Image (cartoon, rainbow, N blue to C red):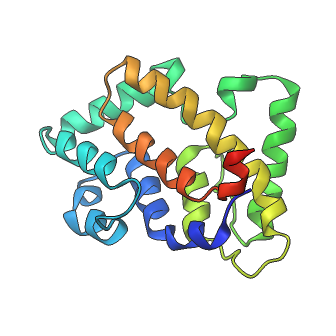
Amino acid sequence: MIDLSKLHNFKQSFGYFALQLMYPEKLDFHPAFLEEAFEAGHPAYPHVHAYWSLMQTFSLDEIQENYAATFDFQRDCALYMTYFKFEDAKERGQILAKLKILYEMYGLEMPEGELPDYLPLMCEFLYAAEWLNDPAAPENFRMLTAIFEDGTYHLLQALGKHESPYFHLIKGLRETLKACIEQEALSQ
């Protein structure tokens, strides 16, 4: 079970993850974004700083080329979190519909033409939505966390295989989510 108050404390981090996982623009790499989202004790701190350091060695054109080569042309690096498990199976459509309903329940309008399992959108949802005082949120977030866990696990493995700087970003995202899992759930 996810600890929603811990998850809420990391809202800024999810905004950063969302921004970094979208097509790169120059302003995305302003150091203030990193500083606002991660303090020294944050579980993702070493990972996002490793990512940041690697990205600083590239020009914006190189970063954009790397992004496209990684996420647009490497099938195993898709940013669609249910794709790894279901590809185009009927079950995937059902999960996508449930995710869309979840987003709408918390006031997020789906962007035209985007699928609800798109990782930047999922991070944006955690950044923007207000769930903290909703008694149904723990149950509602169960599926969302399972999708994050499963999809980012496969993505992390593929990024590691390709030696991508995005490996560190996804590792930081996974460590952030892991820090939000209630301890008794980990011991079972």
Question: Seen in the image, is 169 located left or right of residue 27?
Answer: right
Numbered label tally: 0
Image coords of residue 158 (percent x, y):
47, 22
Q: Quadrant of residue 45?
A: bottom left
Relative to 8, residue 150 above or below: above
* Res 116 visible: no
Relative to 25, residue 86 above or below: above
Q: Nearer the viewer, residue 104 or 40?
A: 40
Image coords of residue 39 (percent x, y):
31, 68
Q: Nearer the viewer, residue 146 or 22?
A: 146
Question: Seen in the image, is 150 located left or right of residue 72?
Answer: right
Report the quarter where the C terminus lies. Answer: top right
The residue that appears at 47% across and 55% down in the rendered structure is 18
The residue that appears at 29% across and 34% down in the rendered structure is 165
The residue that appears at 68% across and 67% down in the rendered structure is 108
Question: Seen in the image, is 88 located left or right of residue 126?
Answer: right
* Res 5 visible: yes
Q: Nearer the viewer, residue 47 or 57?
A: 47
The residue that appears at 74% across and 56% down in the rendered structure is 1
Image coords of residue 131 (percent x, y):
71, 74
